[in-house]
Image: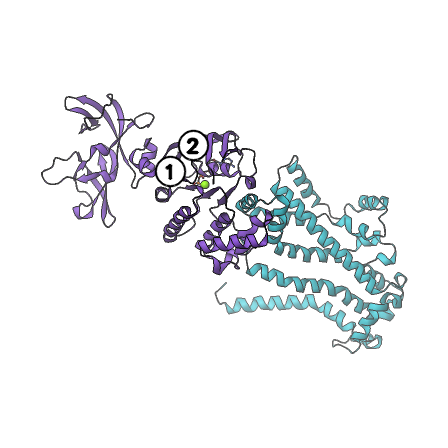
Amino acid sequence: MAKVTLKGVKKSYGQVKAIHGVDMEIQDGEFIVIVGPSGCGKSTLLRMIAGLEAITEGTISIGDRVVNDIEPRDRDIAMVFQNYALYPHMSVYENMSYGLRIRGMSKSDIEKRVQRAAEILQLQPYLQRKPRELSGGQRQRVAMGRAIVREPSVFLFDEPLSNLDAKLRVQMRLEIKRLHQQLGVTSIYVTHDQVEAMTLADRLVVMNLGRADQIGAPHEVYARPATTYVGGFIGSPAMNFLSCRVENGSGGPRAVLSDGTALALPTAWSVPPGEYTLGIRPEHLRTARPGETPHLMLEVDVAEELGADTLLHGKIAGEELVARVPSYAGYHDHSKPGLITDITLAHLFDKESGLRIAV
Amino acid sequence: MIERRPIADFVGHLILIVTVLIVAFPIYLAVIAASHDLAGISQVPMPLLPGSEFFTNMANALLEGPKIVGVGRGTSALLLMSNSLIMAISIAVGKIIISLLSAFAIVYFRFPLRTFFFWMIFITLMLPVEVRIIPTFKVVADLGLLDTYTGLVLPLIASATATFLFRQFFMTVPDELVEAARIDGAGPMRFFWDVLVPLSRTSIAAMFVIQFIYGWNQYLWPLLIAAAPEYQTIVLAIGRLMRAPDAYEEWPLIMAMAVLALLPPVVVVVLMQRWFVKGLVETEK
Ligand SMILES: Nc1ncnc2c1ncn2[C@@H]1O[C@H](COP(=O)(O)OP(=O)(O)OP(=O)(O)O)[C@@H](O)[C@H]1O
Ligand SMILES: [Mg+2]
């Protein structure tokens, strides 16, 4: 087990810059999830840690060792690939033991390790089968088994569940979580699925265009997104963004939308007047009860019923907005509900840079 | 195709059967001719049913064939066959090894002039043995390799076709497999032996069949290189037998030798066919 440190890590492919400088410190035994949209450089970053991709600038250390110039096999890591990358002509047993055989480990030790991993992953009945004789979920487990038998100090996962169907994905997600609790090995996990990210991570790294926008615990990333990008990426449906002008009136600060609607901000917020982006999560909006004065009036164009909740899609001050309300509220397409929001849960971002404003 | 189209099926089968008959008839005739004695085969019209002398003729052909006909200073057909076998197997195995290695280098390594070498190999595709035969002969002669197995085999071993086939196959092997092997600690040659070669075995089988037949059927090259009868091949000998002064006296024997010459390629195809089918049924990727 080991900690992993990235210092100013950059990657260019010729003129194309894929990673613009990432710094992070991963603690021993931590489960880190790197999340972000397609093409943001998640795999590139992971592959640099694995040693499959050269590091253009910066340093990566595993344990106390800078590994920039160390071959993958000597980095004490194991990797699980998206398409499993099992050797098709080898049995499950051979697949799992191949790395150990290369290392010249004795037959009996190999046997012990493989049996133990097979037990953890419930693979004993399949040890003599070829990968093609296994289901997707079983192959996935073999790929994990191959990583486990190595007893590495770091596990690397590159979207290991994305080839599985939805149900199996949920199940394997849980297994990975259990496995991590059981083995306690430092793990770095790449995914573009935010549910996977939120549920698995001790800490999340939200990547955007080759940068780590925010690194933090899932609840912290959710509650205090560092940028509009992170706010929009984490949470489903995505956070609503409204352009506003903040004014400091007699009754405390107010956010004035482009159509003149004014929202009173918490008096504790000390924000210099100016142009901002206000972020409100759909789940922090509710319909006004009789007698309440709504904060916002929504013109619903589509109401999506999800069962327990209904998503009201519409416009406020010319900008798209979604509210998540309980289905019994009974709103439908083209209704015009008044909405109430708990403004203390809202987020304020700089209009230009999209950075969070500390209030 | 799942549809049932009786007429199309019938026409298809008809064409196949007729073609098979056309191709197989001369071979059938050779077998028939090898099973009669000279009197039997000299009848007009020639008999179309097997005679009783097949095994006698075969045994004679195998042990004394060339001697009876009087060519090649009486080298036994057994020696000629074994020469052919050595040549065909060496060429097939040599071509496979060289092509596997060069395809491996071209696909998996970045080295200076890589594209240049690639195109050089490509260009040799356009230069079959016959085109470069005079310079090649000169080189082999200067190296003192006339009348040796090395001289017979070596110049025929380089193979652009097989290199291309393996290159094509290697390019379909997913990159992740290479990376998984790197993480597992396999060096390049280890990866080659433990992963690439086993994965290529159906292509290797296909190449072996094609190149074995290519090697077995070589005529011009052994004709130039092997002056001594001990190094001649069966295909070469058959060419000589046909032109021997006594050829018409020994027609059944000559036909028996022709049938003998046919057998090893047939055996190779039949044996390897099982591999093809296996390879087709269990697609491994
Ligand atoms: N070999 C390469 N040559 C040039 N550009 C590359 C290369 N590999 C990746 N890139 C670029 O680097 C960027 C990051 O790629 P990367 O594979 O890390 O994305 P990702 O976040 O893993 O996306 P996905 O979720 O689709 O897997 C992309 O813009 C990609 O086009
Ligand atoms: Mg990726």
Secondary structure state at the residue bearing disc 2: strand
Secondary structure state at the residue bearing disc 1: strand
Q: How many marks?
A: 2
Counting from the top left corner in percent of width and height, residue A213 is at: 38, 32
Counting from the top left corner in percent of width and height, residue A2 is at: 47, 38
Q: State whether residue A14 is above or below residue A100.
A: above
> In front: B143, or A20?
A20
Q: Which residue lies under the disc numbered 2? A: A24
Task: Decide if ligand 1 comes within 8 Å of the CB at mark 2.
Answer: no
Counting from the top left corner in percent of width and height, residue B7 is at: 52, 68
Q: Amino acid at mark 1?
A: Arg
Q: Quadrant of ligand 2?
A: top left
- Which chain comes out purple in the rendered image? A
Q: Residue at x 66, y 50 (%)?
A: B162
Tell me, for residue A203, which label it has, or none. Answer: 1
> In front: A20, or A188?
A188
Q: Colour of chain B?
A: cyan
Does the image show residue B29? yes
* Mark 2, other Cα within 10 Å: few <14 / some 14–19 / many ≥20: some
Q: State whether residue A268 is above or below residue B88.
A: above
Q: Residue at x 16, y 22 (%)?
A: A249
